Amino acid sequence: MTHSTGDLVMRYIIDNQALWLQNAGLKPLNIVATFDFSGAGGGVELADLAVNVASGSGLIDATLKLAVSLWLGELPSSSNIGVLNDLRVNTARQLAAFPESRVPRLRFAGAGSDFLGVTGAFLPGEDDGVVASHSSCGAAAVGSYNSCSRSVAFDGKLTSANGPSGFMPYHYPMLMSEGYSHGDTILNSAKDEVTSANSSANYLNGDNLQFNTYDEKRGWWIFSSRYRVVNNSNKTSMSALVYQAAN
C-alpha cells in the first residue's frame, strides 16, 4: 500500500528493484499489485508552487503563500523543499514512466479537502486538497478531470463525467469518494459514501479485487438521478473496504 508521495517512490522501486537485488545477489521481489491511496505519481501542482515560492520566482501573492503553507505546515525555502522537486508535475511524470514490470497500480481517490478549499484553487479539476484527480486517478495526461471515470462522478452519480480517456501504464482507478480528503483515504474512519470507478480488477492470474455495489435513485420525478454506492461504505472507511476486499 502507498499513500501520496509513496506512489511515485513505488513506481521507481518497481522499475529498478529487480536489478538492485540481483546486483546484491538477492532474488527480485514478486510484487503482485500496489494499492495507491491519494497517489501523487502524476505530480502535484502545489509542489510546483512551493518551488516557485522557495526560489522567489514569479508573482507570489498572499493566497498562494497561504495555500502552500497550509499543505506543508510552513513556508518553503531553498533548504526545505527536498523531494518537492521530484513531485513537480512534469518531473514526476517523467520518472520511471514506462516500467518494464507489469505491476497493477490500483488507485483509490478522494475529492474532499482539509483546507476549506484554499489549496483547490491551485489544482486543476477535482482534488483531495493536495493532489489533483489527474494524479490520484493515474491519468495518462494532465487535465482538469472531475472523476476517475467517464460514466460515474466522484459522488457516485451515474452521469457523463470528464474523466481521463487513458491512464498511465498498468494504472487502474478502483474506488473514489467526494467526501474523502488527502489524509482521510488511509484513515480507518468513514467520511462519506464510496463509489467505484471499476467494481472489479483482475490483477494476477485470475485473482480479483472486487467491491460489491448497488444503484439507487435519489431525487424526485424528472429531477431524480441514479447513484452507485459500494456496500456498507456509509459506515466503513475506504481503507477498510479495500482491506476487506483483499482478504
Image: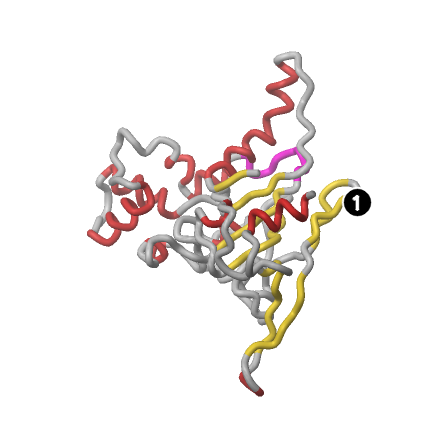
Q: Residue furthest top?
A: 25
Whether residue 153 sits left or right of residue 244 in the image: it is: left
Identified at 59% across, 54% down, the residue is 175
The kind of residue on which mark 1 rests is: Gly
Nearer the observer, 108 or 56: 108
Q: Position of residue 53 (x, y in %)?
A: 25, 42
- Taking 162 as reference, is 61 above or below it? above
Along the line of sight, the residue nearer the viewer: 72 or 19: 72
> For the point 46% across and 38% down, which residue is it?
5
Identify the main secondary structure in magenta: loop
Q: Is residue 45 magenta?
A: no
- For the view shown, which residue lies furthest in the right direction? 206
| Residue linked to disc 1 | 206
Left or right of 238 on screen, residue 125: left
Left or right placement of residue 202 versus residue 166 in this view? right
Viewer can see residue 143: no
Residue 74 visible: yes
Which stretch is magenta?
96-103
* Residue 72 point in image, percent of width and height: 32, 41
Closer-to-camera residue (50/180): 180
Q: Residues within 10 Å of mark 1 (few under 14, many from 20)?
A: few
- Provide residue 58's location: percent of width, then percent of height: 23, 46
Q: Residue at x 45, y 44 (%)?
A: 43
**Total tally of numbered discs in the picture:** 1
